[in-house]
Amino acid sequence: MTGLDWRATLRGRGYRLTPQRELILQAVDVLGHATPDEVLSEVRKHSTAVNQSTVYRTLEVLEELGLVRHAHLSERAPTYHSVRDREHFHLVCRNCQRVISVDPEVLAPLLAHLREELAFEADVGHLTVFGICTECEPTP
Amino acid sequence: MTGLDWRATLRGRGYRLTPQRELILQAVDVLGHATPDEVLSEVRKHSTAVNQSTVYRTLEVLEELGLVRHAHLSERAPTYHSVRDREHFHLVCRNCQRVISVDPEVLAPLLAHLREELAFEADVGHLTVFGICTECEPTP
DNA sequence: CTTGTTGCAAACTTTTTGCATACAC
DNA sequence: GTGTATGCAAAAAGTTTGCAACAAG
């Protein structure tokens, strides 16, 4: 979705275009994967007047509009990422904490099975698989 | 793991066998999938003197011993389940909130791929796939 | 007796909410 | 002007921690 598009989408749905919303979307774009807290920090580099609640409320709106997505990459806060990134799912190593983004293509057989046998349409972009890299550095 | 086994495992690792630990493990067994809070409620049916912190601390110990596992079936609190249940992963419908337990067998090709191509050993028991049942009741 | 375990209360982290003000349209 | 969006501060939800008292082995 281009810069023009999302502004149009926002307005089209009766939402208003505010500086906060632009800053927050930009921050998510810049950061890659970031928690609401990290988004706030990034936003505050550009404007100190933005509030925490606004970040939460805005991330919700942006996700509803399909502009950002979130996944749970830790036991703590969720991380948001822009949908400008190609759709992917995540592997998270419990040992070295590394996050690997994987092409959804490898899920095709599984998705087909869930769809056909269980009538379940999986949300790939939200999927996170925890485990361990078999060759990673042990936890320090 | 039988009743005798787990007590032995506990002691073998230098842990003590306390009424709280027995009650909490029983509660998890009875409840199927339950949040720490729900576990506490169940435990309190049998003893009102058990504390919240004890539930958290005990679930941690029981998980370390491999007696229980947890998964994230909602955006809120985690849910714990007994390993007496056969290993499984979860599908969660965002529409009707239904939780479907699925046999890990269907993941075999995916796991093999992740192992061989990305040197990643996935933790199946912790896996939760969000999505929607294609034929479920719309959210009320 | 010794040391792990518990209860309690307080602190912490993350998220949500109510309400008055501000501002996008 | 009208109603959405924001800032603020307080509350909520879930979890963790320090410490004295307790109890398992």
Image (spheres, coloured by chain):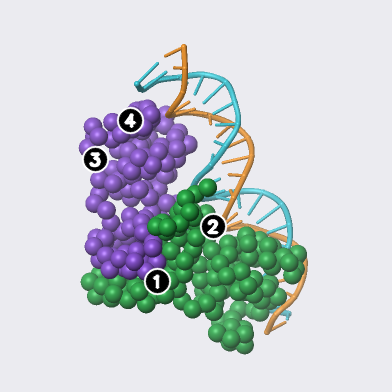
Chain colours: A green, B purple, C orange, D cyan
Q: Amino acid at mark 4?
A: Gly
The picture quadrant where one finds residue B44 is top left
Q: Secondary structure at mark 4?
A: helix
Chain of the residue where label 4 is placed in the rendered structure: B
The picture quadrant where one finds residue A135 is bottom left
Q: Amino acid at mark 1?
A: Asp
Q: Secondary structure at mark 2?
A: loop
For marks 4 and 3, the one nearer the N-term is 3
Residue wearing tag 2? A77
Task: For the residues labelled 4 and 3, say whether their Cβ atoms are less than 8 Å apart.
Answer: no
What residue sits 48% from the left and 36% below the top? B53
Give residue A123's mark: 1
Q: Return the x and y of residue B118 as percentages of the image width and height.
A: 40, 66
Quadrant containing the N terminus of chain A in the rendered view = bottom right
Choose mark 2 or mark 4, whichever is in front.
4
Q: Amino acid at mark 3?
A: Met
User: Relative to residue A41, is residue B86 drawn left or right?
Assistant: left
Q: Nearer the viewer, residue D4 or B64?
A: B64
Q: Secondary structure at mark 1?
A: loop
Q: Nearer the viewer, residue A85 or B139?
A: A85
Cα separation, mark 3 vs mark 2, equals 34 Å
Q: Nearer the viewer, residue A23 or B69?
A: B69
Task: Say if labels 1 and 4 share a chain.
Answer: no
Cα separation, mark 1 vs mark 4, equals 43 Å
Q: Secondary structure at mark 3?
A: loop
